[in-house]
Image: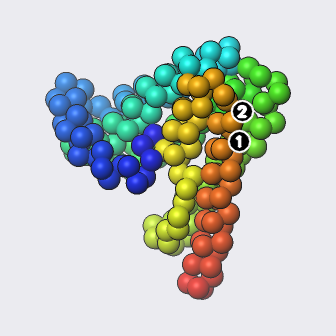
Amino acid sequence: MVPEGLRDRVEPYIERAASSISRLLPYPNLFTLSGLVFGALSGYVLMLRLYQLGALLLLISGAFDAIDGAVARVSNKVTKAGAFLDSNLDRLVELFIYLGIGIGSSGLFALSFVTFGVSIMVSYSRARAEGLSSGERPKGIELGERGVRLAVLFVFLLLGLPEIGLILVFLLALETFMERLIIYYRYLRAMA
């Protein structure tokens, strides 16, 4: 859940923590699954409209998400299967979060639905472009990366303002999806 620009700055701290943690628990998939569990709990709590508690559970889920890859790297357990599992479970966490908010407040269901849909398209467009170009892709501004989206949502859930969080996340995700759609299309077209 660490925004990409901030990731470079906190990465050394995460690696050090992962180094210590991996001595006791050298199982990156355990952290990935723990992130899913806390994400699902967050979604359930958000369904009950307990926004601050839901935000804290989302933060815990994000912490597990930040540490799983680092544990894999420091314990020499990086695998394609683990990366695949992590990416897919990250999408499920997002589903639980948006579903929880939408079910908990019927007035937010449509907004939660479209926000989730655009968020998924941000991830899908990157994965599809990388798949079509042997893992390479151009980068743009990309304001709405997953970490940024969840950080914004976290802040506004903590403030008890889920509707404002959803609107901002929708706009961030839409900007990033549209940017990727244009940049990746041009990039892949030039490759042909």
Q: Position of residue 165 (x, y in %)?
A: 64, 36
Q: Residue at x 66, y 44 (%)?
A: 168
Q: Residue furthest front?
A: 159
Residue closer to the observer: 159 or 96:
159
Left or right, residue 180 beside residue 82: right
- Categorize mark 2 by other alpha carbons within 10 Å: few (<14), some (14-19), many (20+): some
Q: Percent from the top left, x then y, of residue 54?
A: 56, 21
Say which residue appears at 49% left-offset and 22% top-offset.
Answer: 56
Vertical arrangement, residue 88 with respect to residue 52, above or below: below
Q: Where does residue 32 sit, x and y in percent of width and height?
A: 41, 33
Q: Could you say whether the residue bearing mark 1 is in a helix, strand or loop?
A: helix
Q: Is residue 192 left or right of residue 112?
A: left
Q: Quick check: 190 above or below 66? A: below
| Amino acid type for the residue under numbered disc 2 | Glu
Count residues near mark 1 (Cα–Cα under 10 Å), then give few for <14, some for 14-19, many for 20+.
Answer: some
- Residue 9 image offset from top left, x and y in percent: 30, 50
Q: Residue at x 67, y 29 (%)?
A: 162
Q: Are marks 2 and 1 in contact (CB under 8 Å)?
A: yes
Residue identified by numbered label 2:
163
Image quadrant where one finds the C terminus: bottom right
Please say which color scheme the image uses. Answer: rainbow
Residue type for callout 1: Ile
Specify whether 191 is left or right of 21: right
Q: Kindly state the secondary structure of the residue where label 2 is placed.
A: helix
Please give the label number shown on residue 81: none
Quadrant of the image occupied by residue 1: top left
What residue is disc 1 on? 167
Question: Alpha-carbon distance for marks 2 and 1?
Answer: 6 Å
Can the viewer see residue 18? yes
Q: Is residue 96 visible?
A: no
